[in-house]
Image (cartoon, grey):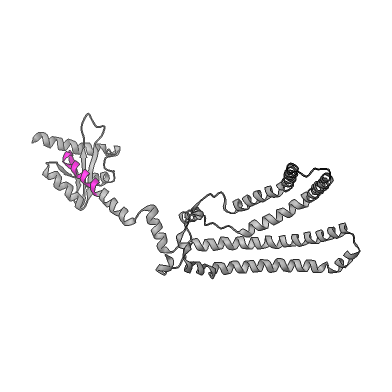
Amino acid sequence: MAEESGQERTEEATSKRREDFRKKGQVAQSKEVNTAALLSLSLLLWYFYGGSFWSQLSWLVSHFWEQSGSLAVTPQSVVQILLFVLQKTAVLLSPLFLMVLVVGFFASFLQIGWLFTGKPLMPDLTKLDPIKGAGRFVSKRSLVELVKSLAKVALVGYVAYKTVYSEFDNALYLVDMDVIETLYYVGRVAMAVLMKSCGIMILLALLDFMFVRWEMEEKMKMTKQEQKEEFKESEGDPHLKAKVRSIQQQMARRRMMAEVPKADVVITNPTHLSVAIKYEQGEMDAPVIIAKGADNLAMKIREIARENSVPLVENVDVARALYKVEVGEVVPEQMFQAVAEILAYVYSLKRKS
């Protein structure tokens, strides 16, 4: 939409837009963090579990060879041996599988929190467009991913090369070592390469995590027009709300004007105020303001009052004080005396007539 309207996305994303992106599964998640976490904890697991793993594996191999000569080769025995090997292998590898599951879950959870949505799995026919598909291969995103992959391979390759190269002189003594010492030496060099590569991966994961979050923030930015449309959707069209409010005010004004004929008196300010008061002795504790208005509305109240023989009493101070009271509320206590005198005057007029 921003591209079509020519507007730039300069406004920060609103909470609603962030939530919409999240529901669609579009979150700032770095795959490099998962890779670095998996590699780091794999090395840590191997450091503590490696000795036990090799010990159990050696026992399994030796036990297999010891028993192989005494076993009769039958379909049943082959199946039993296969099940035995699979069972022992599963036990040996179970810590690794468990670690992969736990690390994969927490590496994602710590980045994006709890999120379950099926929208990324929904089929999107627009993705079948070959023109757009070809465009994704040469997009800015694909270029960034290519640069990241090349940088990762180059850095890890350089670190591995420098580590192995530094061991070149020591490698010359391998010809005089037995097999166990050779394997130990190769394992030590391999562990050094992996540890340094792990350090590189952690650094790259940190940089990629910051880049992915920045990229997502840029993607979620909105144009001014998008913000206005979102505000209309969430709060309603301001013009429509103003129209509804105007209609409500007109209806309230009609109801108020319909009450004017029931008033006992309309107190006026000769310039622009009118306040209609009603009091039913024995049913009301105090007089109630049933209508009020200023300027044209005040004139309309006076007109209706005259048409229905409602007395008009001019009193500037009382009219101004009562105009501050909302329609439907009783007269303030401090105004009881003044209003009572006006009502007494009106009742005396009615008795005389």
Q: Would you say residue 315 is visible in this rendering?
A: no
Q: Would you say residue 141 is visible in this rendering?
A: yes
- Which SS does the magenta portion mostly show? helix
Q: Is residue 276 above or below residue 2?
A: above
Q: Is residue 75 above or below residue 6?
A: above
Tally the marks: 0
Task: State the quadrant of the C terminus.
Answer: top left
Q: Is residue 252 magenta?
A: yes
> Magenta residues?
250-266
Left or right of 34, for residue 280? left
* Residue at horizontal 21 percent and vertical 40 percent from the top: 277
Please name whichever residue, 52 or 286, is drawn nearer the observer in this view of the structure. Answer: 52
Q: Residue furthest top?
A: 282
* Spot occupied by residue 238 in the image (x, y as percentages of width and height): 34, 56
Q: Which corner quadrant of the image does residue 180 belong to?
A: bottom right
* Spot occupied by residue 331 in the image (x, y as percentages of width and height): 27, 39
Left or right of 22, for residue 348? left
Please name whichever residue, 115 or 330, is drawn nearer the observer in this view of the structure. Answer: 115
Task: State the quadrant of the N terminus.
Answer: bottom left
* Spot occupied by residue 92 in the image (x, y as percentages of width and height): 74, 47
